[in-house]
Image (cartoon, grey):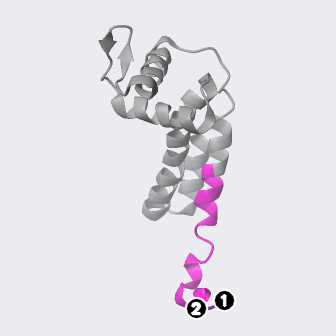
């Protein structure tokens, strides 16, 4: 209870709204994890598999350095959840879901609570 004495009344529970926006966005973006793959996704999937096996992001005989950060995130997701299309898509879903509360907080600071909720519902 002493934590509420140091936090102004208007800020109490201010973390609940962005957390709700994050949870809803994560759920929404997770709905299509099992759809058929796009060709661009397969480049990262193959490069991530070789990254785990050899330490180099390779597709066939060439190295694939385009989007290396995303390829690393896919490789880490493979290590955490196992290989599969859903685990390859998880980093993108997580980052997209993190954008929603960040946008919510910025719009709430700049334009108010109503505008923030309208923005969150439209993303």
Image-quadrant location for residue 35: top right
Q: What stretch is highlighted in magenta?
A: 1-22
Q: Which residue is drawn at 63% across and 43% down?
A: 26
- Magenta segment's dominant SS is helix
Relative to the observer, which residue lies in front, 122 or 70?
70
Q: Position of residue 44 (x, y in %)?
A: 44, 21
Q: Mark 2 points at which residue?
A: 5
Tell me, yes or no, whether the highlighted magenta stretch contains residue 20. Answer: yes
At mark 2, the secondary structure is helix
Tell me, yes or no, whether the highlighted magenta stretch contains residue 98. Answer: no
The quarter of the rendered structure image containing the C terminus is: top right
Question: In the figure, is residue 118 to the left or right of 73?
Answer: right
Q: Where is residue 89 in the image (x, y as percent from the top left)?
A: 56, 29
Vertically, is 28 above or below 49? below
At mark 1, the secondary structure is loop
Q: Name the residue under label 1.
A: 1
Q: Which residue is drawn at 33% across and 8% down?
A: 61
Q: Position of residue 95 (x, y in %)?
A: 49, 42
Relative to the observer, which residue lies in front, 50 or 19?
50
Question: In the figure, is residue 66 to the left or right of 111?
Answer: left
Relative to the observer, which residue lies in front, 76 or 121?
76
């Amino acid at each position: 209870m002493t934590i509420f004495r140091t936090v102004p009344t208007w800020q109490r529970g201010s973390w609940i709204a962005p957390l709700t926006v994050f949870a809803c966005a994560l759920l929404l973006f997770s709905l299509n994890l099992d759809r058929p793959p796009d060709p661009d996704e397969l480049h990262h999937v193959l490069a991530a598999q070789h990254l785990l096996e050899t330490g180099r992001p390779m597709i066939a005989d060439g190295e694939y350095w385009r989007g290396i950060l995303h390829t690393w995130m896919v490789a880490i997701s493979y290590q955490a959840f196992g290989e599969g299309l859903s685990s390859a898509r998880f980093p993108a879903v997580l980052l997209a879901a993190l954008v929603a509360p960040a946008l919510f907080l910025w719009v709430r600071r700049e334009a108010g609570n109503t505008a923030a909720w309208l923005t969150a519902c439209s993303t």
